[in-house]
Amino acid sequence: MYPGKRLLDLAVALPLALLTLPLLVLGAVLAAGQNGGPWLFRQLRPGLGGQLFTLYKLQTMTAARDPATGQLLPDAQRLPAIGRWLRATSLDELPQLWNIVRGDMSLVGPRPLLPAYLPLYSPQQARRHLVRPGLTGWAQVNGRNAISWEEKFVFDVWYVEHQSFGLDMRILWRTAGRVLGRRGIAAAGEATMPAFRGNEEVGK
């Protein structure tokens, strides 16, 4: 982590969290309306050094289950129009500004993924946990969910090895364009991104 990165996080995230509070309230109301109550999504994710923390997002999916098996329906069937809109506008990510203020995350870094992926990484891919996870990152501005897992991890590790104030400013600027353009929200044929199954799938 370069000198001043934590200061940058606080200088941007705290005022941004306050400024976007009306949008967060709007998103919470919409999420609660589609889900019949729950609006905040909480999930453990690996942070710096692989240590788990609680990540916060607006709830975009319903809890609809298959009446025959009781299992949750596929993501695409649990993502209604409001949820898709919250994701497309990135309003669902606003609660993570408080993760940044708390020190769980940074403005820029590899996105925090699922704990189940930890044993599936190669030693090189695991280097993504040498920095705090980010609200946005080098992989997000180079394709987001429209690129493969292998490509994402290459971008993540490249960021870890080249992080700087200038690079963070570049990523934040490009993120604004990505959000406004609503690009790379989902992989082809997926509601978001298919699960990472390990490196045998990507030929490593």
Image (cartoon, rainbow, N blue to C red):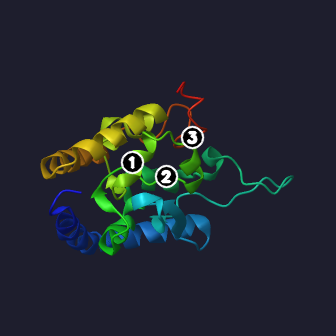
Is residue 182 among the parts visible in the rendering?
no
Up-down relation of residue 55 to residue 79 (above or below): below
Q: Which mark is residue 196?
A: 3
Q: Closer to the camera, 6 or 192?
A: 6
Residue reaching furthest right?
Answer: 68
| Residue found 22% across the figure and 43% down from its top | 162
Asked where in the image residue 71 lies, by quadrant, the reply is bottom right
Find residue 164 and report its horizontal and vertical position in percent. Answer: 17, 49
Q: Nearer the viewer, residue 156 or 25?
A: 156
Q: Are marks 3 and 2 in contact (CB under 8 Å)?
A: yes
Q: Which quadrant, please, contains the N terminus?
A: bottom left
**Residue 54 appears left or right of 25:** right
Q: Position of residue 112 (x, y in %)?
A: 44, 55
Give the quadrant of residue 203: top right
Residue 160 percent location from the top left of the image:
30, 46
Q: Residue at x 35, y 41 (%)?
A: 157
Tell me the crowding category of disc 2: few under 14, some 14 to 19, or many 20 or more residues within 10 angstroms, Cα based. Answer: some
Mark 1 residue crowding within 10 angstroms, few (<14) / some (14–19) / many (20+): many
- Residue that numbered label 2 is attached to: 113
Pointer 2 with pointer 1, Cβ within 8 A: no
The disc label shown at residue 128, or none: 1
**As shown in the figure, which amino acid type bears the numbered disc 1?**
Arg
Spatial CA distance of label 3 from label 1 is: 15 Å
Which residue is nearer to you in this view: 62 or 134? Answer: 134
Q: Secondary structure at mark 2?
A: loop
Mark 3 to mark 2: distance in Å? Answer: 10 Å
Which is closer to the viewer, label 2 or label 1? 1
Q: Secondary structure at mark 1?
A: helix
Question: In the picture provided, is 130 more to the left or to the right than 78?
Answer: left
Amino acid under disc 2:
Leu
Residue 64 in the figure: left or right of residue 189: right
